[in-house]
Image (cartoon, rainbow, N blue to C red):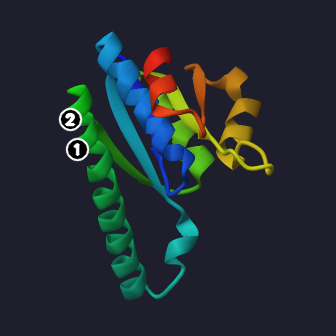
Amino acid sequence: MRKFLVVLDDSRECLNAMRFASMRAANTGGGVEVLAIIPPDEFNHWIGVGEIMRAEARERIEVHFEVFAKWMRDKQNIEPELVIREGEPLTEIMNQIHEDTDIGVLVLGAGTDNKGPGPLVTALTRQSGSLSVPITVVPGDLSKERLEAIT
């Protein structure tokens, strides 16, 4: 089954990327894999403190994921997978795509402010020629109705 890989973070545009991925998966018989990345600099503390912070970060991610997962289950009849990786975001996205051959499309949300689409979108579009999957960039300000119409 072809999976849509979408990155879970705290950005506003993440919501539209999640919606797009789940609607496309539902309409094409695919799946959704949600990737959350814990940056390594969050744990540069003593070992015990770092482990506690790592556990808290994972718990926050799982709670955040469950909000999206419930919507995907209830509205799109999709059971998403959660993958949590630790490291630099760009590297971990590339690694996940390389390691999971069922991933067919990377879905990213683009920021809507005047600073540009966001660091991940910028970095990954620069490397798009070396990716083994296409990238879909979803504008962060698309309405729910417009998303439904194009998926």
Estimate the x, y position of residue 142 in percent, counting from the top left: 57, 33
Q: Is residue 29 above or below residue 51?
A: above
Give whichever of 73, 120 is nearer the camera: 73
Say which amino acid is labelled 2. Arg
SS assignment at label 2: helix
The image shows residue 136, relative to residue 89, as above or below, that is: above
Vertically, is 133 above or below 10? above
What's the amino acid at mark 1?
Lys
Q: Which residue is mark 1?
A: 70
Q: Which quadrant of the structure image shows residue 138?
A: top right
Residue 110 position in % (x across, y down): 64, 39
Quadrant in the picture for the C terminus? top left
Circles 2, 1 touching at the beta carbon (< 8 Å):
yes
- Residue 25 is situated, as x and y percent measured from the top left of the image, at 35, 20
- 120 lies above or below 128: below
Q: Residue at left 52%, top 31%?
A: 107
Can you see residue 99? no
Q: In the drawing, does residue 90 fall left or right of residue 25? A: right
Query: Taking 137 as reference, is 101 left or right?
Result: left
Q: Identify the residue shown where x is 33% and y is 14%.
A: 27
| Quadrant the N terminus occupies | top left
Decide: few, some or many residues near mark 2? Use Cα within 10 Å; few <14, some 14-19, many ≥20: few
Question: Which mark is on residue 73?
Answer: 2
Which residue is farthest top?
28
Q: Position of residue 46 (x, y in %)?
A: 46, 88
User: Viewed as shown, does residue 32 lie left or right of 127?
Assistant: left
Residue at (62% x, 24% y) in the render: 131
- Crowding near the residue tagged with mark 1, few <14, some 14–19, many ≥20 C-alpha atoms within 10 Å: some
* Residue 13 lies in quadrant: top right
